[in-house]
Amino acid sequence: MRREEASAAAAAAEAGTPRSPDLHDLSDDSDYAAAAAASSSHSAMRSDLVDQGSGETAKVDVVYEKERVTIHPTQYGSGRISGKLRLYLQQGSLFLSWEPNEGVDSLSSNSATMEIEKYRNLYTIKALPLSDVRFIRKHTPTFGFEYIIIVLSSGLAFPPFYFYNGGLRELFATLKKHVFIIRSDDDPNVFLVNDFQDPLQKSLSSLELPGVATVANAMSRQNSLSFTSSVDEARHGSDAKHGASSSMTEYVSKQKHRSNDPGRDLSIQVLEKFSLVTKFARDTTSSLFRENHSSGGHTYGRQQQEYVLDNRANDKYKDQQITPDKDSLLSDSMESNKILAWGKPREQPLSVDEWRSFLDPEGRVMDSKALRKKVFYGGIDHVLRKEVWKFLLGYHEYDSTYAEREYLAVMKRTEYEAIKSQWKSISSTQAKRFTKFRERKGLIDKDVVRTDRSVPYYEGDDNQNVLVLRDILLTYSFYNFDLGYCQGMSDFLAPILYVMEDESESFWCFAILMERLGANFNRDQNGMHAQLLALSKLVELLDPQLHNYFRKNDCLNYFFCFRWVLIQFKREFSFDQIMLLWEVLWTHYWSEHFHLYLCVAILKRYRSRIIGEQMDFDTLLKFINELSGEINLDRAIQDAEALCDQAGPNGAACIPPGTPPSMPIETDGGLYVQEDEVM
Amino acid sequence: MEAKIGRLVGAIGAFFSGGDNVPWCGRDIIAGVEREVAEAATEEHKNVSIMRLSWALVHSRNTDDVNRGIAMLQASLGGSKSPLEAREKLYLLAVGHYRNGDYPRSRQLLEHCLEIQPGWGQALSLKKTVEDKIAKDGVIGIGIATTAVGLLVGIAAAVARKN
């Protein structure tokens, strides 16, 4: 209660009409004149602020400056970085900068010093235009120091800035003089800059129904309402008005659903009230603790306790590692047997008769989940791959008919020929002036002659299929010119062409696969980083001891699994096996990221050798590469299934959004979308 | 023998921690993804990396990181172009508030998640965890409140008896 009173008082103090940004009016204000004089003296004393490139005309007026504005990259006191926050005017625009102080705390150890230096450079703000700021969140705790979080229009936020010398009120007062800034209607601690929310917020407020539980934060409430409406619209194919009424209907039905279980909801709500008592007690205690020890340079409280718990966990794992080999071997074999019992046995491939039973008279797949389950556990008879792979990859919709699919094939062939002619029509004279084309063609020519040559379909000289492979890859490099061609793509295309035996259909199946896996080949490797990060989280969840071993041996980047992930085990299994594995992966029956669980399963299968032989990174990498051709595929799939089941939703929570092969999340800067929605 | 004791201790720990398996992200992961944002080659890559940074921040042990992640998600929630994306961000907001100990708000956000996609395993799992936490804290709160009332009654009785 005291906390609420404090925040209410702060809100009352901050209340006030924002001034007009008209500078001409402000020039008459005597206070502003004094401030301007002070700013002039500041700029005179600090000539380094003047941008040399701008010449004499660039005058910098510092309108706000505050020392001891601090960030906490780590939870330790020694990790704090103190700096100077400035607001200054330049060529009529307001800019913000934060520069860390020079020098490092002498109490820090060497490694900590290097760490802090890295963060110092990472978080320095040189010249941030206030027009790029979306909102500023202010936090005034009952105990401890005030801080703000600055959020940009791009959705990126800087770490919290703590004001150890106060001055937060003056900061907002200065901001109000120079930019349009208003307090959010729903959260008094959020100050919207360059606000575009109001029209959206007002229109969405009309959808609000009395009695519906509200989220404290307006943004999440508005947008969840918006998306409920959009779901309704998509479902009914109707206009916005009908969407709104559907939304209201849904809320009414939600109320009914809630009343169906009155006991549970009531008890949760009662316990929620009492949990606030606990939260208040806990927060007060931890704040007092932090306040007492902040001068000592350490942060205590929840984080410290959690860290201590983590240390104890580490100690436990360390003890386990000291366990004699005999016991560990026994536990390994027991664990292996347990895993074998969990995975369902492999089944026979999908047969022609079974496939026909999945189709209705017009050719639609009636139960795609049952089909995917069948393929997951048994694979596909080879004569059916040509047809079924098109569904698994998404080239054919499950509910498409025979007639629709024939029409699609004709349309797509025409489209493919059009794209192909883009590079076919380039003469040798033009090619001399088309460096990127020559480079890509050279890369492709080198790769196709060494892709799967041991497979009869691609063996021998002057093989027509190799030429088709090359043509498809060249066409794709024009179809997706931004991505182009990268080594490894031919490894994905070769089995597809072998199955499809048709140039156009192979191209489109390959293109759809690249929609999901193209991020593996991005120049900045962000797709690979995401998968290896998720893999490390899954190992941590499913085998903490192995994870601990990798951490101690500097293997946490999981680069030894790079090849497994990049080309989805293409080099680890035979050509026939890889077709089976990929159709299992493409079902997405257990997870879109089943290949990562497969990685974990293989690592766990060989963990006793990895840990027993104390492999370092180089040895581990060599060992992993030499596993090629040695892995039992059926057993690995069963193990992976067991692990995926064991991990459940927690496994999915370990995988960041947008990790390949999930379809890429389409995001734009919030600013642009806001404008579109306002129109 | 030590292995068995270790496993037993782990089992007991899991029981008392209520099966909290929401993953943690260490400082090195956050710094790595941060660098990825800075070095993103295209606008599309940058946006994907920002989303991943939000994911890493709300899973951090550091309260400052969690608050920063929450602020980023709130800012970008308005920019969601699809229900799938909004549900992802609502879930991460719920994780952030859960990490901050603000269980009621986390629960509300999860309910909005489940409006968008009923039956989503991740949200259902976290919602159960959050409700268990609320129940546990509620019971503790009842204890605190009861103790306080008892103290007041005792003091009043003592004062009355003294008079």
Image (cartoon, grey):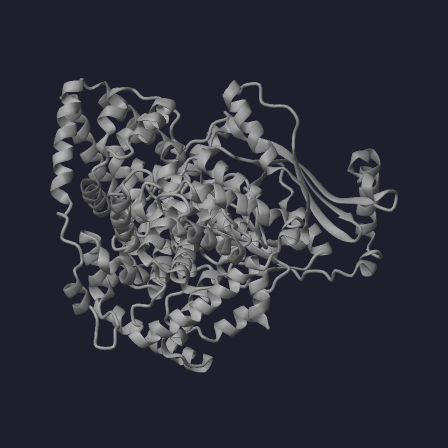
Task: Find residue A487 and report its horizontal and vertical position in percent.
Answer: 46, 42
Q: Pick the residue in front: B121 or A94.
A: B121
- Residue A37 lies left or right of residue B17; in this view the side is right
Position of residue A416 relative to residue A558, above or below, is below
Q: Is residue B36 visible?
A: yes
Could you tell me which residue is drawn at 27 percent across and 25 percent down? A610
Q: Quadrant of residue A442?
A: top right
Query: In this view, which residue lies farthest toward the right?
Result: A56
- Residue A366 lies left or right of residue B116; in this view the side is left
Q: Pick the residue in front: A174 or A618.
A: A618
Task: Find residue A218 and report its horizontal and vertical position in percent.
Answer: 48, 62
- Residue A69 lies left or right of residue A539; in this view the side is right
Q: Quadrant of residue A620?
A: top left
Could you tell me which residue is drawn at 55 percent across and 28 percent down? A116
- Residue A68 lies left or right of residue A185; in this view the side is right
Quadrant containing the C terminus of chain A is: bottom right
Task: Find residue A427 and report its horizontal and vertical position in percent.
Answer: 62, 55
Task: Find residue A16 and report its horizontal and vertical position in percent.
Answer: 65, 60
